[in-house]
Image (cartoon, rainbow, N blue to C red):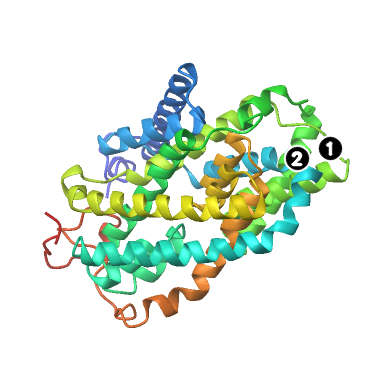
């Protein structure tokens, strides 16, 4: 092979290193487009006075762009940094009054677990009886707010993995889009608190970010649900509670974290096909509607029994992810520690009962994870499978 050929393998005429630089430029372009769209969506909703505008607006804008096929991307380190920054902001808002509500947690957690059981059973029953989904796929889709754990287990079964991923992602999307409108904000909401609070100095911000990142990454490595968010929140609460630091991160940082979080949720619809989604969306939306009504009823019962804010309880019982619902609580002015704690307990309970819930549904049988007739392509490398018609009209 001649020297000129060696230097241009795969890309004739390209100097050494050109391919790597081009690849980096492509990735940076995708990330910039994603954040730009998310920021524009958040700004637009903020101008019209929408609730939780930076989170909801960025999510809607990026989801629409993802469905249209635009090249979007968000690196994992950026997602982790965003969750840690929001955790820090949330931790600095934890008050002694909020900690005093811990005495009401045992009763609230009991209602939470009953609500999870009712929501899961009702959703699975509806998807199998009304929509005609197979039992295994319906049960995976009905498990609330444990997407990563559910997908890991589903890859070892004959369940429709693309349908499960879409139904689970659709639930989080709908909850983040609707709950700010259904639940009125209480007191000062998150963004207002960010602007009103005393800001940390540059040195204080660096110390807080270092502590939050270290704790968040550790929690992530330990497999704790919502580890980055909870790690930042706990580190911040300890540093603020001990008096070592006082104040919020500079205003633009938490707002940027809201935008990045919305982008992460919107990116779940990347690679989706509207045509293939049609068979899943109807059942998924009906399942979400059932979950919203059931959790609203349990939250109302807890509100009258425990005399806690109804909106706070509804967010704590809602079948969303730890990060999304905790951040939503902060954005709407509720106690994020209460909401986040309940969601962590819910996910732990779900992981304990998943083997029992899936027993008898054939979940242990290895099988194809994706197929051409599935509503959404998740991983092309997982293998081909025979075409399968959807039971939905």
Q: Residue at x 67, y 41 (%)?
A: 90
Kindly state the secondary structure of the residue where label 2 is placed.
helix
Picture layout, residue 97 above or below residue 375: above
Q: Nearer the viewer, residue 380 or 44?
A: 44
Q: Quadrant of the C terminus?
A: bottom left
Residue at x-position 53% and y-position 48%: 314
| Residue closest to the eye, 86 or 14 | 86
Q: CA distance from mark 1 to mark 2?
A: 8 Å
| Among the 4 quarters of the image, the one containing residue 377 | bottom left
The x and y percentages for residue 200 are 78, 29
Residue 266, how many percent across, how many down?
Answer: 39, 40
The numbered disc on residue 245 is: 1
In depth, the one of 383 and 48 nearer the eye is: 48
Circles 1, 2 touching at the beta carbon (< 8 Å): yes
The residue singled out by tag 2 in the image is 208
Based on the displayed image, in which of its 4 quarters is residue 387 positioned? bottom left
């Amino acid at each position: 092979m001649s020297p000129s050929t060696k230097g241009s393998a795969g890309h004739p005429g390209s100097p050494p290193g050109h391919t790597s630089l081009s690849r980096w430029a492509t990735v940076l372009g995708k990330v910039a487009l994603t954040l730009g769209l998310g920021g524009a969506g958040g700004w637009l909703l903020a101008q019209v006075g929408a609730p939780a505008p930076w989170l909801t607006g960025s999510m809607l804008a990026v989801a629409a762009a993802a469905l249209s096929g635009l090249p979007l991307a968000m690196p994992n380190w950026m997602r982790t940094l965003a969750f840690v920054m929001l955790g820090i902001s949330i931790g600095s808002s934890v008050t002694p009054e909020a900690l005093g509500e811990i005495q009401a947690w045992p009763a609230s957690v009991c209602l939470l677990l009953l609500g999870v059981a009712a929501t899961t059973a009702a959703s699975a029953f509806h998807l199998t009886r009304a929509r005609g989904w197979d039992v295994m796929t319906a049960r995976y889709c009905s498990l609330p707010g444990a997407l990563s754990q559910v997908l890991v287990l589903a890859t070892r079964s004959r369940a429709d993995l693309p349908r499960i991923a879409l139904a689970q992602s659709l639930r989080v999307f709908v909850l983040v889009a609707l709950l700010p409108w259904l639940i009125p904000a209480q007191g000062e909401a998150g963004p207002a608190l960010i602007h009103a609070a005393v800001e940390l100095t540059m040195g204080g911000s660096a110390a807080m970010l270092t502590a939050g990142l270290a704790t968040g990454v550790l929690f992530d490595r330990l497999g704790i649900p919502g580890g980055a968010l909870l790690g930042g929140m706990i580190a911040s609460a300890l540093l603020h509670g001990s008096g070592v630091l006082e104040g919020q991160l500079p205003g633009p940082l938490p707002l940027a974290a809201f935008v990045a979080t919305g982008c992460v949720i919107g990116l779940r619809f990347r690679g989706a096909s509207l045509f293939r989604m049609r068979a899943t969306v109807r059942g998924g939306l009906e399942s979400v509607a059932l979950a919203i009504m059931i959790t609203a009823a349990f939250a109302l019962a807890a509100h009258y029994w425990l005399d806690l804010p109804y909106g706070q309880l509804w967010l704590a019982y809602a079948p969303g992810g730890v990060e999304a619902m905790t951040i939503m609580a902060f954005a709407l002015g509720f106690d994020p520690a209460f909401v986040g704690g309940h969601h962590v307990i819910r996910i732990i309970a779900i992981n304990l009962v998943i083997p029992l819930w899936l027993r008898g549904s054939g979940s242990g049988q290895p099988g194809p994870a994706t197929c051409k007739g599935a509503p959404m392509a998740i991983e092309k490398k997982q293998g081909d499978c025979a075409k399968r018609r959807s039971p939905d009209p």
